Amino acid sequence: MTTEITEGVKVTVLTEFQPEYSSPAQAHYVFTYKISIENCSEYTVQLLRRHWFIYDANGSLREVEGEGVVGQQPVLEPGETHEYISGCNLKTGIGKMKGTYLMERVVDAKQFRVRIPEFTMIVPYRLN
């Protein structure tokens, strides 16, 4: 589990390998990641956009950018948490992701970027 706080917004990530959806013989590895976004600031904030950088162990990089997260643009009051689960497929058994969320303070429409901490995705048998 990795955590980072930017401007009072805490992002925590937990990953899990999904062997039932993976096919190592065909270089297809599927991981899920659970994201927890906690508003530790004194302002109500809304998540507007996401921007991901996804790296395979073979050196390839993919970028994913778009509105919200899993079809939502959650509004978080001070002290509230939003959680969601998403997934990623890799061509190698080891990879990593990192990125940012574009957030907006509701009170004055000030936009700011919240860092999503870099996290690794590793097939469990690669750890032996």
Image (cartoon, rainbow, N blue to C red):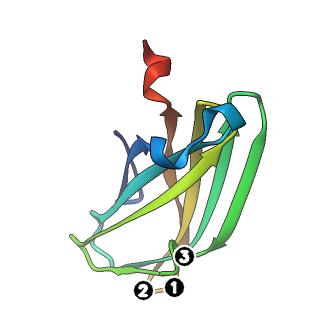
- Residue shown at 46% from the left, 51% from the top: 32
Q: Position of residue 97 (x, y in %)?
A: 58, 44
- Residue shown at 44% from the left, 17% from the top: 127
> In the rendered view, does 96 fall on the left or right side of 83?
right
Q: Which residue appears farthest toward the top when viewing the image?
A: 128
Q: Which residue is mark 1?
A: 109
> In the rendered view, does 56 fall on the left or right side of 102?
right
| Crowding near the residue tagged with mark 3, few <14, some 14–19, many ≥20 C-alpha atoms within 10 Å | some
Secondary element type, mark 1:
loop
Q: Which residue is mark 3?
A: 68
| Crowding near the residue tagged with mark 1, few <14, some 14–19, many ≥20 C-alpha atoms within 10 Å | few
Amino acid under label 1? Answer: Ala
Q: Are marks 3 and 1 in contact (CB under 8 Å)?
A: no
Asked which quadrant contains residue 102, the reply is: bottom right
For residue 99, above or below residue 74: above
Q: Position of residue 71 (x, y in %)?
A: 52, 80
| Crowding near the residue tagged with mark 2, few <14, some 14–19, many ≥20 C-alpha atoms within 10 Å | some
- Residue shown at 43% from the left, 12% from the top: 128
Q: Are marks 1 and 2 in contact (CB under 8 Å)?
A: yes
Q: Compute the Cα span from label 1 to label 2.
A: 5 Å
The disc label shown at residue 106, or none: 2
Amino acid under label 2? Answer: Val
- Comparing 85 with 51, the one in front is 85
Tell me which numbered mark, 3 or 2, is placed earlier along the sequence: 3
- Residue shown at 51% from the left, 72% from the top: 69
